[in-house]
Every structure is written in structure tokens, then in C-alpha cells.
Amino acid sequence: MTSETVDRVLDTPVHRHRMPDRNFRLWLVFPAVLLLLLIGLFPLIYSLVISFQNLTMLDQDTSFHGLMNYAQLFRDRRLWEAILHTLLITAVALPLELVLGLVMAQLFLDHMPGRQLFIALIVLPTIISPIVAGATWRLMFDQRYGPVNQIISWLTGQQQVLLWTVNPKLVYPAILICEIWQWTPFMFLILLAALSHVDRSQLEAAELDGARFPRIFFKIVLPAIWPVMAIAILIRGVDLVRIFDVIWALTGGGPGTMTETISIYTYIQGFQQFESSYTAAIAFLIVALMSIVVTWAIRRMGLAR
Amino acid sequence: MNARRRLALPLRYAAAIAFTLFFIFPVYWLFIISFKTPAEIFSYPPVWYPKSIQFANYWVLFKDGDAFTVWNSLVLASISTLIAMVLGTMCAYSLVRFRTGGENLAVWIISQRLMPPIAIIFPIFLLYVWLGWVDTYHGLIILYTAFSLPYVIWMMRGYIEEVPIELEESALVDGCTRWEVLWKVVFPMVRAGLFATAVFTFVFAWNDFIFALVLTRTEVITYTVQVTHYFGGQSNFWAKIAAMSVLGTVPIFLAVATMQRFLVRGISMGAVKG
Amino acid sequence: MAELTIHGLHKRFGPVEVLRGIDLKVSSGEFAVLVGPSGCGKSTLLRTIAGLEDIDRGTIEIDGREVNDVRPRDRDIAMVFQNYALYPYMNVSDNIAFGLRARRTPEAETQRRVRSAAELLGIGGLLERYPRHLSGGQRQRVAIGRAIVRNPKLFLFDEPLSNLDAQLRDEMRSEIKRLHQDLAATMIYVTHDQIEAMTLADRIVLMNSGQIEQVGAPLDLYDRPATRFVAGFLGSPKINLLQGRLVANGRSLAFEASDGTSLALPAALAAAAHAHVDRSVTLGVRPQHIGEASGIAGRNEVTLRTAIELVQPTGSRTYVTARLADAAVVAETDAHAALKPGATIDLAFDMGHAILIDPESGKVFAHGLAE
């Protein structure tokens, strides 16, 4: 062995075995990978195959129909509206959750009496099922018996019978409120932990140097918590794109198709219209696009190292 | 400087209370509806707290057999969690200690966690129809297990990395097989991580809606799907919605309360060691 | 440059009183070192001067102005932290410039001052680099640069060399001393290392359990310690302490150890100790003042014969441990003396440098050196 190879061997990171056992390590991953192929590879291939056919509820036509379904994708106005709706929700909810979570994290960063209790209570919405969250707000938003309208009535002095789940002007606020209510605690928790890990002596040094809070926050704190924040944004961003339960509970995609998102639209196409091939095309496209974006993000952030 | 700090605290406290009220009130509302009488539920102005705690709504659920759906959720979530924990930890160990599959495998595994269920569920549904696995326990268990694996693998990777490799090397020298090293040395060391990850995996499966919606019909309905059965076009069975939701939520509160030390790490997928 | 005055400072953390009545005055341009064992309160004291901690009672004055309620950033002080506290997402130049930019100093001026500070510290070529690409010593210099660039009234150092290896520490110590000479600034420096304290300080403030044991020039504390604690803290190897009694010895006094061994006290020492005759005392003699007897008795020397237990050569000197009246005594001998454990040796005690301690109060009541 030359000294170079010796160095390379000695450079092996300390948490890996230097004598790999080929069979053992492969057998360890085999069952998991097999199951993962079920949800990772199979849907991709199967969707692709079916999307070239013309399968619907009535018509079991498995002949090759070329790119017919994909062409239809581009012409499908409802699909593009669904994409727009999804992006709208994501673009509004994500920054709000982030900012609100940051404000709350900063608020709860220092000690105060009862802090533990506050945090435990705030975190509850994140733990319940999204469908339950949707159901809860459906009850909250009820036009006659819901507390939301009642409180608004108190504030405005006159009785309000707002139809949160039906009125086109109110459905999006309703969805957004429910979603932000459920997931801001998630952001809050992560950001709180990240903030508490910031090196105190850097903050003290900055304070001694004469910096005021905004400067300290933007130049020192934010860069320090950015890695964690990026992961949180990725997770929440992806979750928002596939939002389903909350909308299903609150509006069912309505009124009309006003609040249909990608997931809702796909579900309707597949399980209510039974346009199997077309749905497969949509599914394939979604998976392909998400794979690219997500894989890029994971590699970029070094999550797999 | 003392004066400045003293001023800030009441303000912070007020803000803290305001935030907490916002986040806790809807949960509170859900809970008390489940305890109200129909008269109290459908009263205007709303009744802010019921005169007494009625369990009538829960009783109805049990009588009608709807509460059985909670049992379904329990079976599906626990079995899938168990399998996922075992297979996932094995896989994570291989990834950490032997760098199996390199970065590519790790990236692929993690990316599965971020795939949209709806896109995956559709082909799976067709497959299950062909296999006759729709509305079966094993069908859903397999799916939940597969979907939980990325999370388990990702989390356990972090916990395993924290175990000093010298412990394993010393066990190998002492005569253990690799298999024994995994189960006798590593597993006990990551016990805390195992429990925490198991709880969060359980919660993900328990709270799932879309898979259950697509793949159950009558036999294996979970509580999440059952709740939506109470939504009506004209009227909603409010009491049932609330009661069923609470039935499905309280177990989760308890489970997470026991693991609240690991809350941050579990929720952030290990991004922050909470 | 500024003067620092502290009156009656008290501070507690919860039930624990960490600073118990500190009175201190540091003159303008002085290099004061706060030194003491872990937990003595030196870092806490430094942080109260910085304004990073509140105080419960007492006053802190910088240049005659009371700063108890003044925010850290308005006290015109700079601090160098133990772990450097560099901002990892800024390069060296931005790190140093941070304070100036925070005070809205014009950019041209900022650049000029950053550059001259960097040149002074020998890091002029590193201005574009990031902290993670710097060695420990370089990072330390950046931290110091950040402090000096603001021309503050007061410099505070919180154990800045603790994270460096021994060789680097020696280098940086000289640099800091040179810096003090160049800038003629008032500096307050915290360390647990007595060698750093001895070499750097104009005056040492030795602390123990939240109180000041003694303040004075390094050699003052070394030669004329006020208490047993001070005598034991400074000096390496530690001072030898022997229990015994003072007895009359002709017209003078002698120290009698428990086994009867007697060491005569020189006149100067005896003069201060008369009141303690026939009482228990502790005798302190530093290893540097015990050596191998040369055959010619010095003026204040007392020679005793004992057996060698341990021999520890260090290259420049050899330390010999011998037993004397139930106590282990360390003596310093020439590096090349051929000494072996078990052999007998004649040790000469220079009693002119000895001190006497009252065992009950711990106070040193007599030392042989002229005031």
C-alpha cells in the first residue's frame, strides 16, 4: 500500500465499518427496498403504460393510443386551474406559516413562566389528523352555529351569516386559515429549536459591537438557522402541493371547481369519473416532475450524505 | 437594563396567551361539541361551554358499531408501524455502516417520503383491484408500511450514526456475528430513537385519510374515513363528527405526550436534534 | 483610555451568590488580570462589566460615569470571547467591520480601520477568507481585530487562549502583551492559567469563591501573598506547606515540625512572628527556594537531610520530592545532578523567602522579605 492509499483508508469516516460484509448488508436493505419499489417504481411504470391506453370505466380498451392523453393534459383547462389553485395556496400559506412561526419562535425563545405548557398546547393542531382539522374548521365556520361568525358578529355589531365554505370570496380564506392554523405550530417548533441552537456568544459579541436587533437578526440569526429553515420549507412546500384532506373536508373542491387542487382533481378524475388512462397520465406527470424537483432539492441540501 | 426587561415580559405574556388561544380554541370547540346535547349544539348564540358533560354522542357511536373504525385504525397503524420499524432500521443500519447503495440509494429512499400520495395511489388502486386486495387489512398494511419506510430509514439513520462504532467493533472482536451486533448492541443503544420514531410513524398512519379513502369500502374503514361519512349535503351529523374525531384524536395526544421529549426531532425529520 | 471603578458588587444566580462584594479599581492604561479557580466568579465579573449580566447591588463606573443601567453597546467596550464568536457567514473583513458598520461609520473610514487593524495583527492577507478556513490562532486574531478596530475605552478578554494548544498559546500571549504596549489601552483579562496571569498583568486580581483574595503586581503576589490561597495558587510547582509550631530558639524563633525537625527563622521573619510563639503555624517555602545543599551555608539557610522519593526532570530543572515530617516536600535542583530515588540528600531551605500562615484564618502574617 502506498502512503496515499493508507491515507485514504484512514480517512474513512469514523462511523462506517472498514470491512464490508457484502451479503449481510444487501440482505439488510432488501426487504425495505422491495416494499419501496412498490410505491416508488411500480406506480411510475404502470402509470406510464396505462397512460398510453384508453382505459375508462366503460371502455377496457388496452390498445396503444399514443400521446392522446398527454395532449389532452395541455388542453384541459380544469387541470391548469387546479395547478393554479395549488400554487396559489402554496404561495400564500408557506410564507405566512414561516413568518408567523418565526415570530412565535422568537417570542417563546426566552424563558417565561408556563412556557412548557404554552408550547404543549400550541403544538396540538399539528398532531391531529388533517381531515379532523378540516372537520373542526367546518364546524367552526358554520354559518349559524359556528363561533367564527359569532365572534365577527360581536366585533361588527351586527349579525353575520357568512358562508365560509360556499361563498367564492370566502372559501380560500377559509382553507388558508385552516391550513395555516394546523401547520404553523410545525414551523414554530422547528424554528424554536433552531433558534435556541444559535451560538449565544455571537449574539453577545454583536450586541457589544453596537448592533441593534434588526441587524443582529438578519445578518447573524437568519444565516445561522437557514439550513434548518430550508428543510422545513421543503417539507411544508411539498405537503402543501399535495393538499387534499383539508379541502375535501371544507369544500370538497367547490363551489363548482373553484377550490380544486391537483390532488383533488386527480382524485375526481380517477375515482369519480373513472378516466383511468387520463388519470394515469396526470399521475405519471406529477410523479415525474416531483421526482426531479425533490431529487434536486435533496442533493442540493446534502440530505442524503 | 432591568427596567427594559421588566417591561417586555407582560407584553410577551399577552402575545403568548393570544397565540395559544388561537391554536387551542378550535380543538376545544371540537371537544366540547362532542359533549353537548343537540340543543346545545344547535343553539344560537353558541354555547361556549356545556352545562354538563354528556357522553351520549359517544354512546351512539359504540352502539352503531362506528367506533369499530377506531379499532381498524389501531390495527392498521400498529402492524404497519411494527413492520416498518424492523425493516427500516435494518435498512438504515446498512446505509449507515456500509454505505450500501451510496448516495443514490439514500436520495431515492428519502425522495419517496416527498412523493404525492394521490399520484401513487391511483396505479396502486388498479393493482389492488386486480389482486383483490381492496378493502383488506393486509392490503392497507403493506401500503402503510411501504409509505412509512422512508421516514423510518431517514430517522433511524441519524440515531444509528450517534452510536460509537467502537462498541460494534468491540462486540465483533468478542465473537458476535454481524446479525448479533445489530440486535444486541445497536438496537438497545437506539432504543429511545426507536420509540420516538415508532410513535411518529404510528401517528402518520393513524392520521392518514387518502389511502384509506381509496382502498377501503366497508370492512376496513378507518376513523378518518368514518368522520367524512357524517358530512351531509344538507346537514352534518355534528355530534358524530365531533365525537368520532375526538375518539380518533385522544389516543394520538396520549402517544405524543409520552414522546414529547422527541417532538422536535421527530417532526423536523431530524433536521434539528431537539 | 478609561478607568474602571467597581464598588460593592453583588450578584446571585438563583440561590447561589456568585459575586460577594467586589471592590476594584483599574487605572487607565492598566492591564488587569482576573484569575482564579473554576467557579470563582471571574467570568461573571467580566460579563457584568460588559453589561451582559445584571448586578444585584453595587456600582460599576467607567471613566467616572456609572454604567449599571447602560446597555452593552453604549458602554464603549469591546470583548474577545473564548470561542472567538466570529460570524461564520461573513468573511474576515466583514467580521472586523461589523461593529463599525453597526454604528454607521462611513465606508471609506471603515475600510481604512479594518485594514490597519489587520496589518497590526498580521492577518492582512486573510481579509477575504471565511472563519471556517482559518486556524485557531488566526481566528483569535480576527476576534482581537474586531475589538481593536472600534477604539473602545475598555478591552475585555474572556479566557481567549484556552482553546489554543500550548505552543500557540505562548505565541499569542506575547502578541497580546505587545498589543497592550502598542495601544496603551485599559485591558481586563480573565484566565484560569496563573502563568498567563503572571506574564501579562500589570496587576493581578486573584479571586476565590466570589471574592477578591488579593490585588497587586504579579511579583508582589508571588513574594508576599496575603493568604494561604494566594500562596498556593501562584507558582508552579506549588508552594510547600508544612504544619508545625513556632518555638523559641535562643533569642530568635524556630519552626518545629511535627516530628521535631527544626528550622530556624531568620531575624526579619522572626521579628514579625513574635506574637505567634508557641502557637500552631503553617510554614510555606517555594520549591525554588529549596535546593541541594552546596556545602557553603547561605545567610538564611537551614540544611536538613532527608530521603528522595521521586525525581522528575523537566530539562531545565529537576524536581525532587522528599519526605519531611509526614509531608512531601518538593525541591528544585540543577538539571544535571545525579539523583536517584531512595538516596539521601541534603536540602538547603532559604528561609529568607519563607512565609508563615495562621492555620485558622489562612492569612499570611509574616514573610521574610523587606516590604
Image: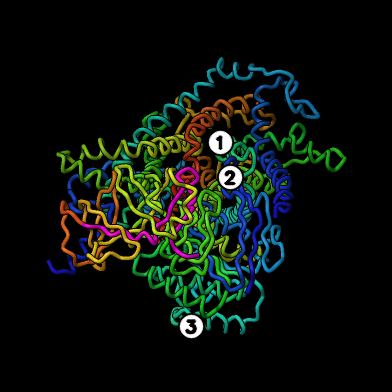
- Identity of the amino acid at label 1? Ile
Residue C115 on image: x %, y %: 52, 83
Mark nearest the camera among 1 and 2 is 2
Pointer 1 local density, CA inside 10 Å: few below 14, some 14–19, many at least 20: many
Q: Same chain for marks 3 and 1?
A: no
Frontmost residue, B127 versus A150: A150
Choose top left, top right, bottom left or bottom right for residue A87: bottom right
The stretch drawn in magenta includes residue B229: no
| Quadrant location, the N terminus of chain B | bottom right
The answer for which chain carries disc 2 is C
> Over which residues does the magenta segment extend?
C346-371
The answer for which chain carries disc 1 is A
**Image mark for residue C17:** 2
- Where C1 sits versus A86, above or below? below
**Image mark for residue A21:** none
Mark nearest the camera among 2 and 3 is 2
- Identity of the amino acid at label 3? Glu
**Distance CA(mark 2)–CA(mark 3):** 44 Å
- Residue at 20 percent of width and 56 percent of height: C345
- Identity of the amino acid at label 2? Glu
Between discs 2 and 3, the one toward the N terminus: 2
- Residue at 22 percent of width and 61 percent of height: A10
Q: Same chain for marks 2 and 3?
A: yes
Query: In this view of the protein, can residue B244 be seen by the observer?
Result: yes
Mark nearest the camera among 3 and 1 is 3
Frontmost residue, A293 versus C54: C54
**Image mark for residue A128:** 1
Query: In this view of the protein, can residue A248 be seen by the observer?
Result: no
The stretch drawn in magenta includes residue C359: yes
Q: Which residue is mark 3?
A: C119
